[in-house]
Image (cartoon, helix red, strand yellow):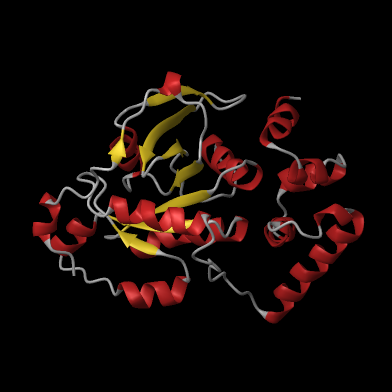
């Protein structure tokens, strides 16, 4: 159970602000993802100490926030993705978040989970782990859950989801150093992550596998692509965006090239 007295501990003294103009290399790229109002921006501001660059996402009016900080002699770049409730690409925010997770280069995604509203937040979480295994959960607002008498069995939750879960308070920085240590261990392959994914009934799972096989037959270079299951699920759901990529014969270009190629195609 969370202890309020822990709030006063100086746990994050090793998180340092850095001069953006003097950055010569970036060791790790991390992204923040989650529902609106779960504390993403609060954690972003805490880590970066407002040491940020603000622009727009390519071809969009939505603001893009990139920040930088140093921890244990490593330079981190952190990107705050738009808050969203799903990755179905209905709104601009959903499209940006989905496409970044699917097509861009990053080391790990921090999923911000509201400790007072876990069930609702997990809908987005399960969509994210269909796209990537590179996920760690920051269980935010643990103090608020404690005040409301909500007890969270972290061990049971971890056993269900199969990803590292770190209870934090983004506002004060409680446990943020532990979160960063977990991230470093994951990126350095000291912790293996195999998130639990939703299993559908036998017929749907058969169709998903058939679509995956068809994709590999048509695009052999995708045989080792980790997001192939997600592509198959979206095709089964009638995703017009993915269908259009296939009809234009550019799906494989989307999935195998770097972010700058993705952005060029989006603008075309």
Return the residue nearer the eye: 240 or 8.
8
In the image, residue 22 sits, relative to residue 152, either above or below, namely above
Q: Quadrant of the N terminus?
A: bottom left
Q: Residue furthest front?
A: 73
* Residue 205 in picture, x, y percent from top left: 71, 74
Specify the quadrant of the image occupied by residue 115.
bottom left
Q: Residue furthest left?
A: 5
In the image, residue 197 sits, relative to residue 72, either above or below, namely below
Residue lying at 59% horizontally and 56% vertically, measured from the top left: 132
Would you say 99 lies left or right of 258 here?
A: left
In the image, residue 6 sits, relative to residue 262, either above or below, namely below
* Residue 159 in picture, x, y percent from top left: 43, 77
Specify the quadrant of the image occupied by residue 249.
top right
* Residue 265 in picture, x, y percent from top left: 75, 30
Asked if residue 211 can be seen in this view, the reply is yes
* Residue 31 in picture, x, y percent from top left: 48, 43
Q: Residue furthest top?
A: 21
Residue lying at 23% horizontally and 59% vertically, measured from the top left: 142
Asked if residue 113 can be seen in this view, the reply is no
Residue lying at 33% horizontally and 61% vertically, measured from the top left: 166
Residue lying at 44% horizontally and 54% vertically, measured from the top left: 183
Q: Residue furthest right?
A: 218
Q: Quadrant of the C terminus?
A: top right
Would you say 204 lies left or right of 84 here?
A: right
């Amino acid at each position: 159970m969370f202890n309020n007295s822990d709030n006063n501990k100086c746990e994050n003294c090793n998180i340092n602000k850095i001069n953006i103009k003097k950055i010569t290399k970036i060791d790790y790229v991390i992204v923040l993802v989650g529902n609106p109002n779960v504390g993403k921006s609060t954690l972003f501001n805490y880590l970066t100490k407002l040491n940020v660059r603000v622009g727009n996402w390519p071809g969009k009016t939505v603001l893009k926030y990139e920040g930088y900080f140093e921890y244990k002699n490593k330079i981190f770049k952190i990107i705050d993705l738009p808050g969203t409730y799903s990755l179905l690409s209905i709104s601009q925010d959903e499209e940006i978040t989905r496409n970044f997770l699917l097509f861009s280069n990053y080391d790990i995604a921090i999923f911000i989970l509201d400790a007072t509203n876990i069930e609702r937040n997990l809908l987005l979480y399960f969509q994210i782990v269909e796209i990537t295994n590179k996920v760690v959960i920051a269980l935010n607002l643990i103090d608020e859950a404690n005040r409301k008498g909500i007890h969270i069995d972290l061990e049971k939750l971890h056993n269900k989801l199969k990803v590292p879960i770190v209870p934090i308070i983004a506002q004060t920085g409680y446990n943020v150093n532990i979160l960063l240590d977990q991230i470093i261990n994951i990126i350095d392959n000291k912790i293996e992550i195999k998130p639990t994914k939703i299993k559908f009934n036998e017929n749907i799972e058969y169709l998903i596998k058939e679509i995956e096989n068809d994709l590999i037959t048509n695009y052999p270079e995708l045989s080792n692509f980790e997001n192939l299951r997600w592509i198959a699920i979206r095709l089964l759901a009638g995703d017009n965006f993915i269908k259009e990529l296939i009809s234009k014969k550019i799906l494989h270009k989307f999935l195998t090239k770097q972010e700058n190629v993705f952005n060029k195609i989006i603008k075309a």
